[in-house]
């Protein structure tokens, strides 16, 4: 094994590993750098602060951009399969986190997309050994995916409703009362049926106010529908997981995901993290 190869392995262990003190320290320092760079971008968006410290924010931005660019290149250099890393979730996020600063040279305000760097903080799951909590997130995600057809039908139904209500309001109120077009009336219908109620457009006629009341009541009636759909699928997923999480000793199932021992025979359960 050549010295060059040994050096790449050592760098790989530091950058990609969390089992060694050096690797853990690297990831923690990286997360602090990400948070500081994002904080600088957020403060730079405040006009009063930006005017006074514009040059400082630009210096900070390019310092972190250069730092993360070098880090990304080193990751490609030391990774045994650089293309596999580049196409992975973390690889794409690492790349996207440095591109906005370069895009800002050609597109104004593009540097504010640096906020995407916050996705890199997801590495804290690896550092703090919290990967087991991703199982609960996967259960919720599966429930949403299994509910997609029902949610799609629900959204289509809502779109039909707001289009009908918006068109009716356009015919009732008309341009004289702010409903200048059907698209704008549909916008008002969406705002009303979701119970947001900006108040920028309001019906003035008695018939329009009656229709508005009907839309608001409809909004309250359907607002819990998607929650109920996902909750039902979530309950099915949780029951399925309990069946899967069985005891190898007595063969009986029905254990919670975080159970350590069988509640029927007391044998230690084989956990899957």
Image (spheres, rainbow, N blue to C red):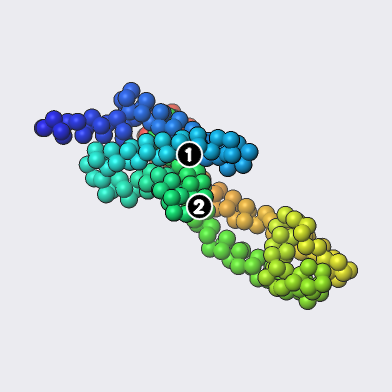
Q: Is residue 85 visible?
A: yes
**In the foreground, 79 or 97:** 97
User: Could you say which quadrant of the image residue 261 lies in?
Assistant: top left
Residue at 45% across / 42% down in the picture?
117
**In the foreground, 203 or 216:** 203
User: Could you say which quadrant of the image residue 177 lies in?
Assistant: bottom right
The x and y percentages for residue 44 are 55, 40
The x and y percentages for residue 209 are 84, 65
Please tell me how many numbered marks the rendered image carries. Answer: 2
Instruction: Rate crowding at label 2 as few (under 14), some (14 to 19) or many (20 or more) other CA atoms within 10 Å.
Output: few
Quadrant placement of the C terminus:
top left
| Residue 98 in the figure: left or right of residue 177 | left
Q: Is residue 141 visible?
A: no
The residue wearing badge 1 is 58
Residue 151 - label: none
The residue wearing badge 2 is 108
**In the foreground, 193 or 71:** 71
Residue farthest right in this picture: 206
Q: Secondary structure at mark 2?
A: loop
Q: Secondary structure at mark 1?
A: helix
Residue at 13% across / 30% down in the picture?
3
Q: Image height check: is 248 above or below 193?
A: above
Quadrant placement of the N terminus:
top left
């Amino acid at each position: 094994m050549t010295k060059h190869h040994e050096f790449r392995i050592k760098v790989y262990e530091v950058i990609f590993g969390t089992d060694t003190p050096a690797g853990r320290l690297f990831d923690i320092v990286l997360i602090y750098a990400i948070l500081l760079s994002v904080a600088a971008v957020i403060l730079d968006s405040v006009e009063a602060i930006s005017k006074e410290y514009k040059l400082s924010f630009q210096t900070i931005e390019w310092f972190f951009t250069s730092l993360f660019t070098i880090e990304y290149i080193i990751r490609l250099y030391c990774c045994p399969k650089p293309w596999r890393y580049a196409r992975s979730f973390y690889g794409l996020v690492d790349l996207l986190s440095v591109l906005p600063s370069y895009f800002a040279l050609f597109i104004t305000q593009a540097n504010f997309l640096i906020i995407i760097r916050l996705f890199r903080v997801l590495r804290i799951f690896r550092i703090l050994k919290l990967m087991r909590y991703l199982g609960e997130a996967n259960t919720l995600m599966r429930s949403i995916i299994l509910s997609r057809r029902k949610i799609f039908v629900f959204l289509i139904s809502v779109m039909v409703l707001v289009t009908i209500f918006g068109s009716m309001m356009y015919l009732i109120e008309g341009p004289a009362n702010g409903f200048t077009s059907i698209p704008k009336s549909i916008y008002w219908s969406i705002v009303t049926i979701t119970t947001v109620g900006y108040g920028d457009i309001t019906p003035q006629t008695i018939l329009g106010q009656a229709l508005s009341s009907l839309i608001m009541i409809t909004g309250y009636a359907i607002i819990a529908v998607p929650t109920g759909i996902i909750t039902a699928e979530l309950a099915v997923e949780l029951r399925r997981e309990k069946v899967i999480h069985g005891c190898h000793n007595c063969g009986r199932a029905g254990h919670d995901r975080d159970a350590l021992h069988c509640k029927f025979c007391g044998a230690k359960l084989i956990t899957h993290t």
